Amino acid sequence: MRTSHCAGAISAAAVFCALLLASSLSFSEAQGASRMPQRVEIPERGFVSSTPGETWEEGLLCGNGTIGANMLSQPLDDTIIFTHERLFMPTGDPVMPPDAMGDRLFEIRRLIERGLYRQATQLAFDLSGQRSFMYGDPFVPAFDLSVKMDSGKDVSGYMRSVDFQSGEATVHWTGEEGIFERRLFVSRANGVAALLIEGSEAGSVDCHLKLRPRQLSEELPERKRRSSSQRFESHITDIKTTADGSTLTFRNGFNDTYPGSLRAVEGVARVITKGGSTKSDGDTLIASDADRVLVLVDIELLYDPERSHIEQTKDSLASISEDYETLLNRHKRIHGELFNRMRLDIGGEEHHLTTEELLEKTSDEALSKTLVEKVFDAGRYNIISSTGELPPNLQGVWAGTYSPSWASDYTHNGNVPSAIASTLMGNTPELMRAYTSYIEFLLPYLEINAKHMFGARGIVLPSRSTTHGFNNALAPNFAGGFWVAGAPWAAHFFYDYYLHTGDRTFLAEHALPFMEKTALFFEDYLYEGPDGKYVFNPTQSPENTPGNTQSQGSFNATMAVASVKELLRNLIAASQELGVNEKKIPKWKKMLEKMPDYMISDDGVAKEWLTPKLEDRLSHRHSSQLYPVFYGMQQEVARDPELQDAFSRVIEIKLDRHYSRRSFMSFGLVQLGQAATSLGESELAYRCLIHLVNRYWLDNLASMHNKKSLLNMDVSGGLPAVVIKMLVSSQPGKIRLLPALPEAWPSGRIEGVLCRGQIEIKRLRWDEGDIEVDLVSDKKQTVTLELPSDIRNISVGKGTASIHQADRINRVRVSLPARQEITLEIAMN
């Protein structure tokens, strides 16, 4: 891809580069010292921004999955907010769903059968014993590192950047005593954050460093600030900060703890200077006349408050290299290997522009190709940086307030699936194990949900979770406790991990047991209606209310039916692959025969509830009825053009009536885009992408939940998934090339797509009607390649693959050897 330091069109970044280069600074570096700041380097893959962050959502994001660092990037008075992936603040004992609901499930079902949906939802809430809807423990920040610089009040030539390939954020400016730079990353190799502060002149770095509780005063309107402070004061206690000659420490405890919960958080910052001196003033460490200052930061979470880890953490930090470049290179080898597995090039030619300029130039009529490439990379960077032992929560691994929206939890009814949507196809399958491990951690809670709420065996995944998985998503006007599609949806990702990787051990020890537990619930939960078809009662179609009722409580939600169909088919296939469950397979096949059929309304729209009794409400931001086409086309849809048109009609209506006038939440567009690509609707997918690119990113290329607000990872995972599926989609034994290629991209290239069936598309290049694809299969197999138009000619340019005729002129069958790179050259009519 393109690399530019100071070349290109005149822009803020280019002008600044020219000014800095003209200064002709010189500096003699001692052995082990890192480079001195002399110019802004525009990352080959990354961004530059010309404005610092004013709020925590606008900071520069770094992370190693476990520790998150968010640098607001103010030159003279900066704040770096540190977080830890497991820092969910305890807010009191978890509430277990009572047995009473399962015992009286028959009453809830009878009320729904009689059309008394509000009464059914109210009864479930009354039986729960809850006073209101309950969130889990919220995800909160650990502490701030305050960095105050004394480089003169006059600041010029400001620029900040993030390099996606290295995971490094940089703030760069000119002060009265030269050029200054702060560089930050969070190491995957050493497990700590590293901050380097440098000046271009020897002895020019003077700074005050302090660890402190998260500061809210500049961040929030007074009303929200008041409520957040009250939450902070009621839950956090025993704040202690210290400073000595080379170390800063932080600790706070929590008030509303419970057995097994987090009890305290500790932080240690080791400060290393080259030249100059340091001294402590209260809890502030002052560095004076230094050439550079290196700060290493670590976080420890305590579950036993009597056992402090501060001294142990000090010792650990003391054993780490004092050379920033050495630490960065260790991290880059790991992070960069993950990030560089993929590359998108659709002809963007303005990579020298700042993000402010790119966002200003792009429009719905002329979507910036450069911006598409940058947010594609930014999304993957954000997800990689926020995936550790746990998957990304709503905010990834970054937090800026003690009262985050929706507790910044794991919202399973749409947000989490969106955030992890590109993990497998984006060629980072190991990151999916964070998700499956977390879901397995929840299993004991999920079994209690099934037993207590439905009187059933098996498991029920609630719509939201953090430190526990009890289903508390009930309120008189919210029927989240009725949502039963959660575990089948999770099972999709368990089985999909196997399809992409071929890991039979995972299939046998993780995926199959999870699918079996999920199916067991539906063996007990489902019952036959008068027509011999199963009834899904009660259900919720996530957060939506049928158009003719005043309650989310419902039955036969399309998502529930579709997810269980997928579950059972995958369960049968997995069992046959492993040679197990011979006696159970006939039962699962019979269950499939009794599933309700998909329905089309009189308006030609795929229905969200599979019953004539409930009317669609297409104005809702979720698009759960599209589940049959989220990940390809289920077999009923693939063989029925009328159903395909009905699902396409849902996408058209939502784009025309709603997204044209309002900016609904971002993952609603991800759902529409995923469905459009499965249906081969290239222009509908492109319309979704226009909104996803233009509306949901800030200058720091952090993705948002709403238009330009509310930091959230849904688009970071979902947008790359939509783009990849526009260019490559797959099922075992079949790969579709350019299935939803928009007219706006007549040529381009994508690298590193992982396909179902253990095939990696190393490179796919297209130019008008010519395609070249390089791929490697992990096993010997024959696959069908499907092209968007008729194939005029196909040949093997490299390798020993064999090409066979197929049943249609836009398809061919290709026999692939194991672990050999094959190049296919294709000309289309």
Image: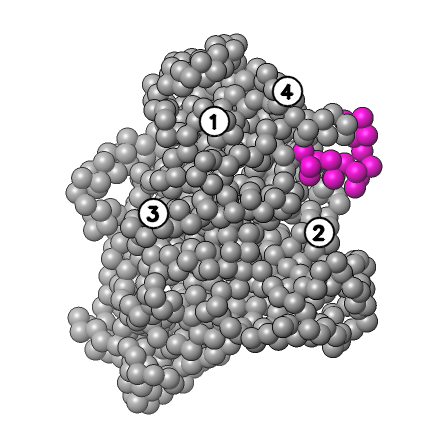
Please, what is the three-letter code of the amino acid marked with disc 2?
A: Pro
Q: What mark, if any, has residue 657 been given in the picture?
A: 3
Front residue of 651/516: it is 651
Q: Nearer the viewer, mark 2 or mark 4?
A: 4
- The amino acid marked with disc number 3 is Arg
Mark closer to the chain start, 2 or 4: 4
Horizontal side of residue 251 vs 575, given as left or right: left
| First in sequence: mark 2 vs mark 3 | 3
As drawn, the label of residue 578 is none
Mark 3 to mark 1: distance in Å? 24 Å
Q: Earlier in the sequence, mark 3 or mark 4?
A: 4
- Residue count near mark 4 (Cα–Cα under 10 Å), binned few <14, some 14–19, many ≥20: few
- Mark 2 and mark 4 residues within 8 Å of each other at the beta carbon: no
Q: Which residue is mark 2?
A: 732
**Is mark 1 in CB contact (under 8 Å) with mark 4?**
no
Q: Which of the two discs, 1 and 4, labels the residue nearer the N terminus?
A: 4
- State the residue position of label 4: 532
Whether residue 33 appears in this view of the structure is: no
Q: Which mark is residue 612?
A: 1
Specify start and end residues of the magenta stretch as a single range.
Answer: 568-584
**Secondary structure at numbered mark 3:** helix
Query: Are the residues flagged by discs 2 and 3 in contact, CB closer than 8 Å?
Result: no
Residue positioned 76% across, 74% down in the render: 796
Disc 1 residue type (three-letter):
Pro
